[in-house]
Image (tube, rainbow, N blue to C red):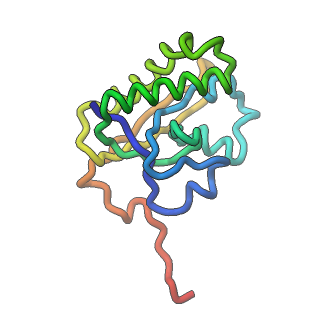
Amino acid sequence: MNLARAIHFDESDMNVFHSPARTGEWCISGGFEFSNFTDGDLAGKARQAFANGWLGLETFGRVTFVAVTRIEAAERAALERGLAEHFVAVYGAPSVEAALAVAREEIGHMAELCDGHEPNTLLTVTRELGADGVRESYRVIAAEAADMAQFAVHGSLDD
């Protein structure tokens, strides 16, 4: 079974997100965070998080790229419980037990996105806000096609 971990190619996520995810933490789409957003909410770092940020399941920070990685059932169960606890603490879910089904659904959706992809396959997310709510689309970058030049910012150390 696969899920995805946060990956950083440079320091840009540290500058564009209010709270960047930690390299290596498990991630999901986290689009639920934007369910009540309006056009007025889409400014600055909040807009960046909305537009293309995956949600880390430890820091609840955002990251631009995730890489498909194998996950064990016990790890997944712990993530589901942690996400359910987050739903209680941040979103007012009535109990962890009540929130577990939604947490399993969110993590299951991410597992479906990762299913069938080779390890180290990169994923990106793009969101748009429309009349019918938040719409997400995903891009898959096969590991052998992921050239660092696609992501890295190059400069001179002599400056």
x, y percentage for residue 67?
36, 46
Q: Relative to 80, does residue 48 appear above or below in the rendering?
A: below
Q: Quadrant of the C terminus?
A: bottom right
Q: Which is nearer the eye, 55 or 138?
A: 55
Residue 83 or residue 138, whichever sits in front: 83
Q: Does residue 76 sit above or below 6 in this rendering?
A: above
The image position of residue 87, as x and y in percent, is 61, 23
97 left or right of 115 in image:
right
Query: Where is 44 relative to 111, above or below?
Result: below
| In the image: residue 12, left or right of residue 46 | left
Q: Is residue 85 left or right of residue 42?
A: left
Q: Residue at x 57, y 16 (%)?
A: 96
| Displayed quadrant of residue 139 | top left
Residue 143: x %, y % from top left? 27, 51
Residue at the extreme bottom: 158
Q: Residue at x 71, y 28 (%)?
A: 38
Q: Left or right? Give the position of 120 relative to 30.
A: left
How many marks do you count on the picture? Answer: 0
- Where, by quadrant of the figure, is residue 93 drawn? top right
Farthest-out residue, right: 40
The part of the image, by quadrant, that contains residue 131 is top right
Q: Quadrant of the N terminus?
A: top left
> Residue 47's spot in the image, x, y percent?
66, 42
Which residue: 56% across, 54% down? 13
Q: Nearer the viewer, residue 18 or 139?
A: 18
